[in-house]
Image (cartoon, rainbow, N blue to C red):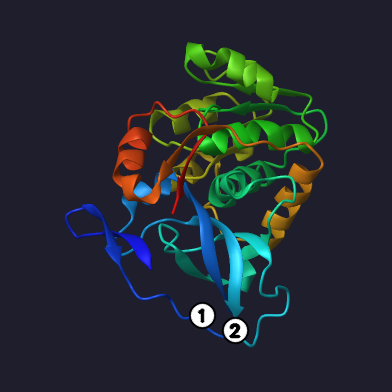
Amino acid sequence: MKAITLSADHHLALQDLPDPRPAPDQLLLAIRAAGVDRADLDHAEGVPGREVAGVVLARGPEVTGFVVGDEVYAWTDGAYAERAAVSEGTAAHKPASFSFVEAAAVPRAAVAALQALRAAGTGEGDVVLVADAASGPGHFAVQIARALGAERVLGTASPEDDDFLRELGAEPAGVLSQADVVVEFTGGETTAAALRAVSDPARAVSTVNPAITAAGGRYAAPTPSAADLRWLADLADRGLLRVALHRQLPLALAADAHRLLDSGEVRGKLVLTP
């Protein structure tokens, strides 16, 4: 199979590798698309990529929820490739309303957003502030907050993204304004600003900065979850979740995708296709 590999000096290259062999609890997927996530920029050696959508080619003897030919999406390792071995516990059937490209944009970014909002106890009547709301996880967080019952959703982003935020259902906010819930996905000064924006620090959540807990905030490290993927698939198929695709690139241009993501100029998600 063709796959992107990352060397010790952080050089990405397209190479020929053996197809992975699924473990007893795994699926072998023919990958149709792979999402590009900010966490991929910090990947160690090997095949990067955590977000994948594809078709089941084979399954291990312990797999019970999928059959050959199923269309699935998953949070896994080694997504920048033509094949991947995926654990059943981190996969779900692809939203019927989504293309493979759209589905591949979801697994880590949207799960991170959902888990952060749940950690903050987001519910009916809340005013929710999403930092960096035009980003991959941010634009999902805006939509998920609405689905969880938020009365208002505020979002910080560049001024040129204001119309985009309104389309998602958020009110553009130039700074981190006061809110019941704040979720942030970038760390640094944004974490401190998130804590200042809430009256109850336990409702300020970071997915990247554990130091938030020292001031009473919550750290929600994103965790693979088939149940969360099923929840998101249902949301998508009810027309309540959409993917903003910034660009679709061929697998061979993974390095370009990383440079683009690192530039901070991506609105929504980048996706690679074999």
x%, y% of residue 144? 70, 38
What residue is shown at x 33% (from left), y 50% (from top)?
Answer: 252
Residue type at mark 2?
Gly
Vertically, is 203 above or below 76?
Answer: above
Which quadrant: the N terminus?
bottom left
What residue is shown at x 19% (from left), y 60% (from top)?
Answer: 8
Q: Which residue is mark 2?
A: 60
User: Can I make out residue 127 in this image?
Assistant: yes
Residue type at mark 1?
Pro
The answer to which image quadrant residue 208 occupies is: top left
Q: Which residue is mark 1?
A: 22
x%, y% of residue 49? 42, 56
User: Could you tell which of marks 1 and 2 lies nearer the N-terminus?
Assistant: 1
Residue nearest the viewer, comparing 126 with 159: 159
Residue nearest the viewer, comparing 83 with 176: 83
Local crowd size for mark 2, using a 10 Å CA cut-off: few (<14), some (14–19), many (≥20): some
What residue is shown at x 53% (from left), y 30% (from top)?
Answer: 195
Q: Are marks 1 and 2 in contact (CB under 8 Å)?
A: yes
